[in-house]
Image (cartoon, rainbow, N blue to C red):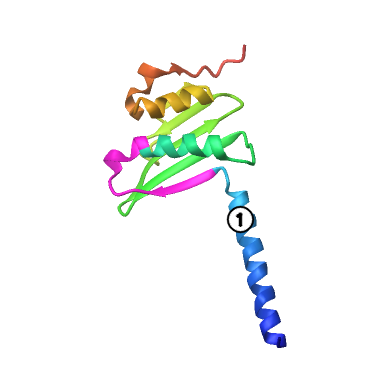
Amino acid sequence: MSFYTKLAYCIFALFLILWGAFKLYRGNSVDIKINDCADSELKTLETLDKTVQRNFLDRNYYEVHSFSSFGPCRIADYDKEKKLLRVCVDPGSGWIGYFKVSEAELHGLVLSKAKFENLNQFCEPYSFETP
């Protein structure tokens, strides 16, 4: 095996290691591409729920950004420790809701196909006051 072949293998292996490290670093943040922003809320919540359930790094914070070819659509993030779900229907305009949600309740929201603007019917508002 020539020197250049060995060098190519080493560079490729280094690339794989760096790519894997980047994926682990961003393991709690997911970007999803969708066709239409109008239908993005359920997909955003579904992806957030899957990310919380399957993330082997067991981080306390997870986020999902959905976007279409026209730009950003929805944002949902979840803090496991605080049991805080935040949602945004227009990135750049701020959060439309803060809700106290357990991991099981987050999964229930997905099963019930909840829309962001109707989350107050399914969830209790999050209180930022310390007990």
Residue ID for mark 1:
22
Q: Is residue 112 above or below residue 30?
A: above
**Picture quadrant of residue 120:** top left
Q: Is residue 107 visible?
A: yes
- Is residue 67 toward the left or the right of residue 25 in the image? left
Image location (x, y in percent) of residue 53:
54, 35
Crowding at mark 1 (Cα within 10 Å: few <14, some 14-19, many 20+): few
- Badge 1 element: helix
Which image quarter holds the N terminus? bottom right
Q: Residue furthest front?
A: 1
Q: Residue placed at 65% from the left, 79% from the top?
A: 8
- Is residue 119 toward the left or the right of residue 24 in the image? left
Identified by mark 1, the residue type is Phe
Q: Is residue 106 magenta?
A: no
Q: Residue placed at 47% from the left, 26% from the top?
A: 106
What range is drawn magenta here?
Answer: 29-42
- Is residue 93 toward the left or the right of residue 7 in the image? left
Q: Residue placed at 53% from the left, 44% from the top?
A: 29
Image location (x, y in percent) of residue 18:
64, 62
Q: Residue furthest bottom?
A: 2
Image location (x, y in percent) of residue 67:
37, 48
**Badge count:** 1
Q: Residue placed at 42% from the left, 36% from the top?
A: 46
- Is residue 116 toward the left or the right of residue 7 in the image? left
Which image quarter holds the C terminus? top right
Q: Is residue 41 above or below residue 30?
A: above
Choose between 66 and 3: the one closer to the eye: 3
Q: Is residue 89 visible?
A: no
Q: Is residue 41 magenta?
A: yes
**Picture quadrant of residue 114:** top left
Image location (x, y in percent) of residue 125:
45, 17
